[in-house]
Image (cartoon, grey):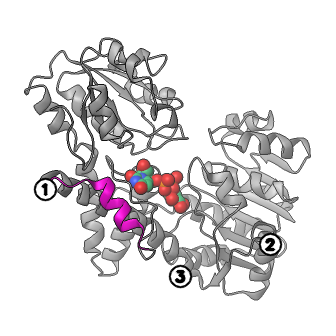
Amino acid sequence: MKIAVIGTGYVGLVTGTCLAETGNEVICVDIDEAKVAKMQQGEVPIYEPHLDVLFERNIKANRLQFTTSLDEGLAHGNIIFLALPTPEDEDGSADLSYVLNVSQEIGKKIGSYKVIVDKSTVPVGTAEKVTAVIKENAKCDFDVVSNPEFLREGFAVDDFLKPERIIIGSSSDRATALMQKLYAPFVRSGNPVIVMDEKSAELTKYAANSFLATKITFMNEIANYCEKVGADVDKVRVGMGTDSRIGKRFLFPGIGYGGSCFPKDVKALQKAGKDQGYDFKILDSVITVNKKQKTIQIPKIVSHFNNNLIGKKIAIWGLAFKPETDDIREAPSIDVMNALLDKGVSLTVFDPEAMPNIEKQFGSKLTYATSMYHALEGADALIICTEWSIFRSPSFIKVKELLKEPVIFDGRNLYQLEEMETEGFTYISIGRKEIGQ
Ligand code: UDX
């Protein structure tokens, strides 16, 4: 099939590349000339496991091309994916200007039947708006379909190639049939393609992300309560998670959720509710609790150093909002670092992928270590903000040698309490007993 993908951000790039991988001819369109030039040379603009291999293979096979020309994309594709940004407006709602501006252009330019697919996370009613905007100028038939993505950063290629489900919001049989054909190679294992109306499809994405953010936040509150009563959240988590109605996943407590999706989507659903006169009280709480959770360890750090952090040197492991990405959007590490810098702490940081992005934001306010161990040299304590695999089993002998004092504040519960006790660390994690205090 012939596909155009408008917007080569995270979602557009993964969508375009993976659709090319199953034999479609894909043209990706972006207004950023420098980015398009780089992609034409085979350079992948984001870090995402496996994407580079697929990217190279499909460019070589001529199934994946890049252009700055919307005209070229529209002339080529029968199915046009909109993978445009929907940033958070000042009031928390999703800004649809990119989506609607491009839709207007599409209306003016298409000369034959096209299926326009909303891939961006968009509020309920967007398919209707996109349809109206295209209709103003269109001289031919077209259909608008809502097809939300559920890609996790770090697993996006896998999630696209083997999705648990595909959601298609469509009221046109012709468009639905085309979409089903396009996705057939990805659901051979029997996972469902679920067809519904456009509004329900749009809401499914917000409901899923808001539910997951709520699940994590609930567990974070249980963890905070565990600390008050001397229970162990890891045991509670396993106990709860074995109930299949609850499930084991997304129950890991920590210093809050971040990223480009959860924070934005929860706020957008909360705002959309308010606009319709519906008050999502549960989402108000999720937002408040998550904000607080990001710096939940700061009072513990302050009290460990007897209220005097001026001149202290602290190491941080993990800056990305989660492992396997260089993305630092809404990362808890940012709140942790800002709080500590305000208190006069000097910070030496390390992350396997996110250092350049953090350096762009923090510049000379931080010291950038060349390795995880280098970050520890002469530090008064270590804080863990992201659970990268390389932090999971360090040489504790080396850690103790390098730190001035063997003190770890672990925001992701990476280590066993017994081990920390045996190794002689002061170890303060989330929702579990403090060791060595
Ligand atoms: C998410 C959704 O999972 C995906 O379906 C959607 O389309 C985009 O948003 P992503 O933002 O890549 O994907 O990250 P995800 O792996 O879902 O984690 C989100 C945040 O929750 C991270 O900050 C992570 O650290 C946190 N988290 C996750 C927890 O704190 N505990 C958990 O148990 C799971």
Q: Quadrant of residue 99?
A: bottom right
Q: Quadrant of residue 251?
A: bottom left
Nearest to the eye among marks 2 and 3: give it: 2
Q: What residue is at 25 percent from the left and 33 percent from the top?
A: 427
Nearest to the eye among marks 2 and 1: give it: 1
Q: Position of residue 39 (x, y in %)?
A: 75, 38
Q: Secondary structure at mark 2?
A: helix
For marks 1 and 3 on the same chain, the one whose residue lies earlier in the sequence: 3
Q: What residue is at 36 percent from the left and 43 percent from the top?
A: 412
Q: CA distance from mark 2 to mark 3?
A: 22 Å
Work out whether residue 4 can be spotted: yes
For marks 2 and 3 on the same chain, the one whose residue lies earlier in the sequence: 2
Q: Secondary structure at mark 3?
A: helix
Q: CA distance from mark 2 to mark 1?
A: 52 Å
Q: Position of residue 196 (x, y in %)?
A: 61, 85
Quadrant assignment for the C terminus? top left
Look at mark 3 in the image and give the residue it sits on: 200
For marks 2 and 1 on the same chain, the one whose residue lies earlier in the sequence: 2
Look at mark 2 in the image and give the residue it sits on: 184
Question: How many C-alpha atoms fall within 10 Å of the one at disc 2: few (<14), some, or many (≥20)?
Answer: some
Look at mark 1 in the image and give the residue it sits on: 229
Asked if residue 22 lies left or right of residue 396, the reply is right
- Image disc number at residue 399: none
Q: Which residues are magenta?
A: 229-243
Work out whether residue 91 can be spotted: no
Dot 3 amino acid type: Ser
